[in-house]
Image (cartoon, helix red, strand yellow):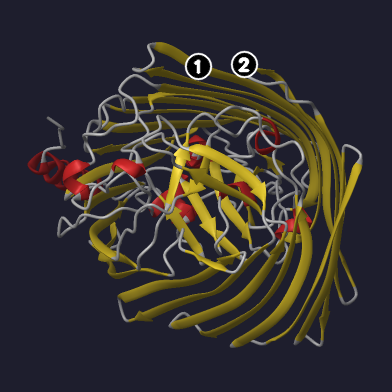
Amino acid sequence: MATKPSLSFACGFFLTATIILAASPHAFCQEDSTKVSRERLVSPVFQSGTITHEPSYTLSDSEITWNDYRYSGDLLQQIPGSFLANMYQPGNPSELYFDGLGGDYTKYLLDGVELNEPTTSSMNLYHVPMEFVRNVQYIDALRAPIYQFNATGGLVNFQTHLYSEAVPYSKVRHMEEPYNYLITDGVFSQNIGFNSNIDAGFERQTTDGRFDNSVYDGVNIRAKYRYSIDSTRQLTATEVYYRTKGGANGGALPYNISANIFQQYLIPLRSTTADLTYLQHHVQVAYSQGDPYDSTQFLTASVFYDYYSFQFGEYVPSPDASYYLTNLSRRIGANIRGSENFAFGRLNLGAEAVRNENSYNSHTLIPSENRVSGYADEEFDLFDLVRAGVFGRGDFVSDKFYPAFGFLFGFSDEYFNLEAGGNISDHVPSLSEKYFVTQDFTGNPNLRAETDKLLQVKANVKLGETFEFSLKPYIRFIDNPIYFREVYIGQPTYPNISVVNLNTRKIYGVDATIRLTVWKFGADGNLNYVNEKVDGGNVNTLPKYYAAGELYYHDILFNGHLNFRVGVRGRVLSEFQGSGFYPEALIYYPTDLNQYGPYGSSDLFLQGKIGSAVIYFTFFNLTGEDYFLAPVYPALNSSFAFGINWEFLN
């Protein structure tokens, strides 16, 4: 029987913490020390790890602290144009789509250095320690391919904290959810002498799971050392280690699902014995320089090393044989990024040299891959009204050259912004797509790179802090698209994945966002429309329509001691076919056997900031609706979670 946190205990926990903390008149809320300087803090330091000072969307430190997120996917799905295919099973990789393109089209960076696994190009969003992160920069598909190789769908850059604390600073975050899902994260920071600082953190996630063979245990350890040469120059050394292990039953197989799907999903499990173990060790050393009060000019040079390991073990009941896959890979490289202002605009420049090595794969030989890249992004601001830009990139991958270029042009003032642009770039197949993604591990080494052509328009209207509306229609044409197809024959143990180049792929879409604040009430909403055609036929992997939003009340009570928000959020999505997950290669593939939806659900949330603590209480799926966001993992029934994020400045 699955266990849930006690509702009475959660309410008592919340009320007790409220009374104790509100009674303290000296509760002090620690903000990121790069924002302000106080008597107890030394001078601000330059915030390194920037990609560009003008991203498409930013998640700030305060939004991260206030949010009742379980993992980074919960935060990133706030970005306009995103759709999170969430398995609702902790630890299992989610698939985050931006404007119709999946995870292998998005690059995830930590302070400007790539995190995607080098063999599969995948990223498990559970592996990002968000309490290590100061803000998140998102760059949409117009400029993302310029700033990072193969980022034709989008770019997400996690900028880590740079503390400067004259006295010890620490923070603890803890959350509890159904099925004994526990998240505990601890942070400590302390200056060492006048010019240096050490920042360390530890995170543990565990759950008993709600399916057979779905336990999960994940550990993250990270540390960062900063040495400031002076107020504008610094050296940093960062290390992030995480190791996860969990049961990987794969959910119910898509071809076994009946019309009565929500009553059958627990029966035809993929496996009751499989497990997936994942490890990453990420090290980077960087030199940065810039003005701590001006983010428009900076220079960062980094060297980095990554080691990755994933092992999938599957015991197949018939024939009686054990099946395992082990994949070991590593990445080593260096990059330099910078931005410089001039009379009418600014110039962003960057270069990177990387070697991806697959040191061992238990089923196939995967050759190493070398890449040398460079980019330039020149933007012009004329009369504080007209903005224009041209950008280009070139990548030498082994013995082939892949160019990319684009443009943008727009008008803006205090209330209105209109921008149009386009680009053309290539998306090179991953090593796993070429060498071992298929069921028999023969791969397809003759896969060609895609050619991606994008046109988009963005309009934004803003009336102070009261009203904001944004609209982004876009159209994308892809030649030689790399496409996964499943070929079901009878009742196979696994789908037979086929990865091929098709002829054309077209995606038409619109992203719309609205934000409204009236007195102490606020409303936020996102609407995505995606219409995809592959070789002339309609594809329904994603919902054509997906809407999400929240309505909340925000107030400050008890002489400023209680800052709280209470509200309702919900989502609605149209019919879709969704994706299956192929654990041997950590990839999602489109399915076409079943039709899911339309669905809708709603959550109730309460967030209170009391002194230096933020307390969360969330009631998920208020009406108990049955729905999926990723087949074949049904969402949780009505359930709740609670937690606390508490900062201390001694």
Q: Is residue 533 left or right of residue 549?
A: right
Q: Quadrant of the N terminus?
A: top left
* Frontmost residue, 224 versus 309: 309
Residue topped by disc 1:
324
Cα distance in 3D space between marks 2 and 1: 8 Å
Q: Is residue 647 left or right of residue 145?
A: left
Residue 523 badge: none
Q: Is 252 situated above or below 61?
A: above
Q: Residue at x 28, y 55 (%)?
A: 607
Q: Residue at x 36, y 46 (%)?
A: 612
Q: In the picture, residue 606 is in which quadrant?
A: bottom left
Q: In the picture, residue 87 is in which quadrant?
A: top left
Q: Secondary structure at mark 2?
A: loop
Q: Secondary structure at mark 1?
A: strand
User: Which x, y percent locates residue 389?
Assistant: 82, 74
User: Which x, y percent locates residue 530?
Assistant: 50, 70
Q: Residue at x 87, y 77 (%)?
A: 344
Q: Is 112 situated above or below 198?
A: below
* Frontmost residue, 6 versus 517: 6
Q: Earlier in the sequence, mark 2 or mark 1?
A: 1
> Dot 1: few (<14), some (14–19), or many (≥20) neighbours within 10 Å?
some
Residue topped by disc 2:
362
Q: Quadrant of the C terminus?
A: top left
Q: Residue furthest front?
A: 490
